Amino acid sequence: MNKQWKLLPEPKEEYVKALLKQPNVPKVIASLLAQRGVHTIYSARDYFRPTLEKLHDPFLMKDMDVAVARLTLAIEKGERILFYGDYDVDGTSAVALFMHFFQDFYPNIDFYVPDKYTEGYGVSLRGIEYAATTNCQLIISLDCGSLNHEEIAESVHRNIDFIVCDHHQVGDELPKATAVLNPQRSDCNYPFKGLSGCGVGFKLLQGFCQKHGIDPTPLWQHLDLVVLGTSCDVVPMLDENRVLCNQGIQYLRNTDKEGLKALFTVLNLTPADLKLQDLGYNFGPLINSAGRIAHAQIAAEVLSSKDPKEALEQAKELGRINDLRKKYDTQNTKEALEIAEAEQNQSALVLYNENWHKGVLGIVASRCAEKLGKPTVALTLSRGEVTGSARGIGDFDIHAVLSNCQDLLLKFGGHTSAAGVSLKEENLSAFKQKFVAEVDKFTNGKEFVSEVKVDLNVNLSDLDLTTAGIIEKMRPFGHDNPPPVFQANNVVVDGTPRVLKDKHLKMKISQGKGEQKFDAIAFNQVEQIEACVGGKLDILFRLEINEFRGNKNLQLNIKEIKPSE
């Protein structure tokens, strides 16, 4: 697959000049901030100080007053409340958030997490039946519910009121719930649309405290769960999410929740050393493995637990499930790549094995698509249907291709880069042919191009420890606020790079004779060693501070290397 470096548009000079009026602001930093919508000194202060005071008034969200009133009524009447969460990290952390918040003063609560394979995404009729048989009078859905018209109608028919807390796209009509809290509603003027499902649930609790004059300090203690749900979901790391994650990571490092402490133990992580990216790399896959391989109930249980012994046993079981997930992941991906080798001349891949585990097919499809540079569908046989996941490449719209194949599908859904599909076994061959043909139509024979976004083209002489230190203060990074990527042209390597662990390159680089030499490392790029010797290079890199034995040094973390033109 062809990779193309795409330099982001230069920020307006007037914004850069406005930021440079602040003392000790390097031009590189002013340009980065202006690019990211930070145009004034005042907005820069908000950006660098994402404190709890920056949270928006929860009552700006449509239906918040109705939701708080109905929740208040349930508590006054002693009604049983069911928290219904989705089966991923966002949903299960939201369930735990509500359980921890209410357990100390209102014990008449319960939670429910659906089975991914027998009930599917969203609110299920089985979940409504559970609420009815356990005498619940109010259901609060977390990270789902916006499209569950039939199920919520059934809940209301059974005299069980419903509050939706969700962040997914809504349809033309909303379900007939008591309240639908969702910033994506067209009639919702809430100033930030990017909250996670757990984040929307948090706003309901914030609104409840605000309405009743309750000191919110105990609520802040549960930001350790909100940061988990927010950072592990694909939501923009902007506005309130920066506040929730910046504050939440601090609470998580000092958490007193037995379930979270048990997860630290299983993951062999030290809380004091925790970074936000650890959540996506470690906590997220561990918690999600329950829904993929077994049942997400155990994830919600460990996150909600208050018993240290019980929490540790549950966390260890989650670890065993995750190990099984890794085994399926590795084996199924290996087999998928072997099948793909025989079809390397095709523009797209439809890979099928009836023995693959359905729970890891999204990962398998992603890895094959990334490695082979082709849209990929990974499928298996489950409950009499061929089912699995599809993944696109770059900006390629795989959802549009599946739309043109829907005559052969039982159902499909997702977005431009990822989707789930199911079809009858007898339609597999026809679907494979049509999918590849539709991809050919969309590409018109052109090679797939993956764009690598570059923030700024810089001279290395403009970089120093001060600049790197300010970039560190731009955290938390995430979706829509990624770590800055810089481009430097015509750099030369001093001598021959050192090879570390047979796969990494360690070197010193400069931009010309007599120029300052910078430490640089290129992870997993040992194949580039010959290109690094003798000629001039263009590089993409992230700027980092490398600390060793108390000394701080500037380091370029090289992401891409190519010969200078």
Image: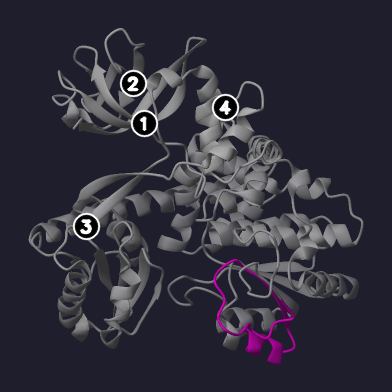
The residue depicted at 33 percent of the width and 67 percent of the height is 397
Q: Amino acid at mark 1?
A: Phe
Which residue does the numbered mark 2 point to in the structure image?
520
Mark 2 or mark 3: whose residue is earlier in sequence: 3
> In this rendering, is residue 230 above or below 551?
below
Is 398 placed left or right of 465 in the picture?
A: left
Type of amino acid at the residue the image marks with label 4 = Ile
Task: Identify the element where label 2 is drawn.
Answer: strand
The residue under the point 63% across, 59% down is: 198
Identify the residue position indicated by label 4 in the image.
470
| Disc number placed over residue 448 in the picture, else none | 3
Q: Which residue is mark 1?
A: 541
Q: Are marks 1 and 2 in contact (CB under 8 Å)?
A: yes
Q: Residues within 10 Å of mark 1 (few under 14, many from 20)?
A: many
| Span of residues in magenta | 152-179
- Indicate which disc, 4 or 3, sits on the residue closer to the N terminus: 3
Tag 4–tag 3 contact (CB < 8 Å): no
Residue 50 at least partly seen: yes
Q: Quadrant of the C terminus?
A: top left
Give the total of numbered labels.
4
